[in-house]
Amino acid sequence: MNTVAKAFGCQLMWECSASWMTDVYGKYVFIGLKSQTELAQYTAEVMQRKLLKAKTEFSKTLMKYTPRAYKSTQLNGFCLGWVNEVSKTVHAFALDEETKQMITDHVEEKTIGKAKNRVQRYSTAGYQAGLEAGSGESIHRPMGAQQNLMIGA
């Protein structure tokens, strides 16, 4: 999600759900220019589907009776490698300082605190497999998209 946000000149924010009946956890929200947030959301959905497909294919290569903890570290490494390889194709979206400040102010207004990072274990073999699988993927943004100065969420 951070890679996609960077590619489209957005910031990423975690929004907790308002009700436990709608969604137990919440969702990621892209904050930025309206046109860019829509493109970022669509790109994130497409890339997530591609990653899940590649992850499923990789998990089929693991032995059927592999211990769960080992399989988990292999899959974590694969996903990390895949995302790192795709992120090499991303160039940060250039925004003027006024727009960057407007986005930052909006995020600060909406957030309460900083999220904690979780450290997950991963294997280097899975990471290498992820690098290979992600080498054919890239994120491209459309050229000449008209910019609205509205903050989208």
Image (spheres, rainbow, N blue to C red):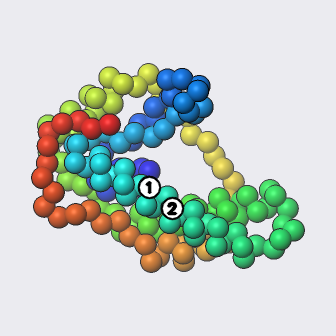
User: Which residue occupies 14% across, 43% down?
Assistant: 148
**Mark 2 is on which residue type?**
Arg
Labelled disc at residue 93? none
**Mark 1 is on which residue type?**
Glu
Q: Residues within 10 Å of mark 2 (few under 14, many from 20)?
A: few
Distance Cα–Cα, label 2 vs label 1: 6 Å
Question: Helix, strand or loop at disc 1?
Answer: helix
User: Which residue occupies 22% across, 48% down?
Assistant: 35
Q: Is residue 111 above or below residue 96?
A: above
Give the image quarter of residue 79.
bottom right
Residue 84 lies left or right of residue 130; in this view the side is left
Question: Helix, strand or loop at disc 2?
Answer: helix
Residue 118 lies left or right of residue 47; in this view the side is right
Q: Residues within 10 Å of mark 1 (few under 14, many from 20)?
A: few
- In percent of width and height, residue 128 lies at 60, 73
State the residue position of label 2: 49
Labelled disc at residue 45? 1
- In percent of width and height, residue 50 lies at 50, 66
- In percent of width and height, residue 15 lies at 45, 31
Residue 74 visible at all: yes
